[in-house]
Amino acid sequence: MPVVIFIFFFGLGLCLHERALADPDTGWHIAAGDLIRKLGHLPASDPWSYTAHGARWYDLSWAYDVGLSVIHQLGGLPATVIATIFLYALAVSFIASIALKQSKSMIAAFLIAALSGLILLSGMLVRPQMLSFLLIIAFYAVLRFARPRLHWLLPALTVVWTNVHGGFLTAFVIMGAFFLEAAAARDFARCRRLVVVGAVCALAVFVNPYGWRVFEAANLTLTSALKDFILEWRPYPANEINPLTLLLGALILVSSLYDARIPLADKILAVFWAAMAMTASRMAQVAAILAAPYLATALARRLEASPFGAFFKSRDADYAADFARRPVRIALVGVAALLVGASLTPTLQGALKGKKTAFAVLPAAEDLDPLIEALGAQRAGLRVYNEYGMGGYLIYKARGAPPVFFDGRADTAYPRDVLRDGAEIGLMDPKKPLDAERLAHWRALVERYRIGAFMVSKKSRLFAALTEFSGWSLTRQTENAALFVRADPDKGSARADVAAAR
């Protein structure tokens, strides 16, 4: 059954392959990997901006970036997309395997894996979190199903996790849940083993290029100065159907928290991460993974206790027998291998590209490439303010020519005062009125950073303001973005801008 899940979600990922490049950070991850391979070591500070001023750059995903750079060199953006879809489908198939092993119900495991796959679809991006998903599953599987001596695999997994993504702290939450389960069962031998393994995992975290500062870097991300403006750190809206409502609906529908047959750690992980998902949308994917064992087991109990319990039990037995047949297993693995192989061919990629010029294109390319070209060699020294979400592509495309103001690396590469100033210059806080005081402050910041051009989204508040502000000329625009260049540094005043804004 897990192979069927893989085939379905790999096919779904191919059909929705454009989503994989929707994240603006993909560009800088590729560029970072290229830079590390070129230098032969991790750069100490950012080389692509004019605002970092030598601040320490913590690239918590450096190992992922290097791997992504190699894949990109071998097969371009299409290869990075296919690799991401593969990891996505693999994660969902592993969830199905764990759900089946835990619930002993083919039907329940299939339904919960399908739900988890749909929720994880929002995280199917060319980003290091894809490896975090697999490592979360690996940690849970080792703690739940592996023999005690195999728990010593966890420190090795921790080393890998610490060097590919800042989500490595999730490992200790998972271990904590299993410790509480052992303590509640008065299994003190297991408690001691988990404490020892956990301590070694904590030491394993230090096996990274930044040593103990990796915690400082993780904290910078968790407490980012731009956290209020980044969508994935905001909670999902309560008045619409989204991954969180699907997850909460499932938890309510199969609610079995008082069922003693369901392991305590599964209950703790499901409830804890569902609560975390209510505070930040990016946590919904982690919740979908770690709630799956509980949901599958609870659903299996519900189906068993329903008036159709005998029917479901009979169907489960039939499905298990069908999938246990060797020819069926070989055929399914063959189909999965053929699908993956076909996805790498120009023929299938061409068929899937639709009206696009290529199978895989960074979304910002169509809008930003003409603006970069418009800057031209004659404006090579011009300082450009780019919107936060544009920085990753500018780094990927131009590698510092022009240098960026900021990008998705945020607090791990830039001083916090720069990020706060960037939010002010970009008018990112819609709650602040455009009064005389704020506009005077805006102009002072523009002068402080000697900004000579703006690259902005046409849907942004800043675009609307710049079309009215004196001293700025709309030089080039595309369907979704625009380039403003300083018309005359001696013209324009805060008073004139206030009048225009009114």
Image (cartoon, rainbow, N blue to C red):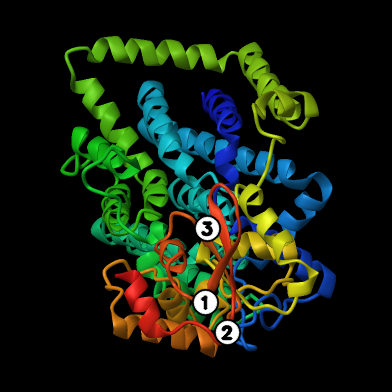
Q: Which amino acid does label 3 sit on?
A: His
User: Do the residues under discs 2 and 1 have CB atoms within 8 angstroms?
Assistant: yes
The answer to which quarter of the image holds residue 243 is: top left
Image coords of residue 86 (percent x, y): 63, 38
Label 1 or label 3, whichever comes before in sequence order = 3
Observer-nearest residue: 254 or 343? 343
Q: In whole angstroms, how far apart are the C-alphas of marks 2 and 3?
A: 65 Å
Q: Position of residue 155 (x, y in %)?
A: 57, 65
Q: Name the residue under label 2.
A: 489
Helix, strand or loop for disc 3: helix
The amino acid sitting under disc 1 is Gly
Percent position of residue 34, x then y: 77, 64
- Tell me which residue sits at (41%, 55%) in the image: 282
Describe residue 8's horizontal placement relative to residue 346 as left or right: left
Local SS, label 2: loop
Distance of mark 2 from mark 1, alpha carbons?
7 Å
Give the residue type that dot 2 points to. Pro
* Residue plotted at (61% across, 38% down): 85
The label number, if any, that marks residue 151 in the structure image: 3
Q: Nearer the viewer, residue 475 or 439?
A: 475
Q: Residue at x 48, y 55 (%)?
A: 458
- In the figure, 59 relative to 338: above or below? below
Point out which mark residue 471 bears. Answer: 1
Q: Which of 157 and 132 is in front in this view?
A: 132
Question: Is tag 2's residue or tag 3's residue first in the polypeptide sequence?
Answer: 3
Q: Residue at x 41, y 22 (%)?
A: 106
Of circles 2 and 3, the one toward us is 2
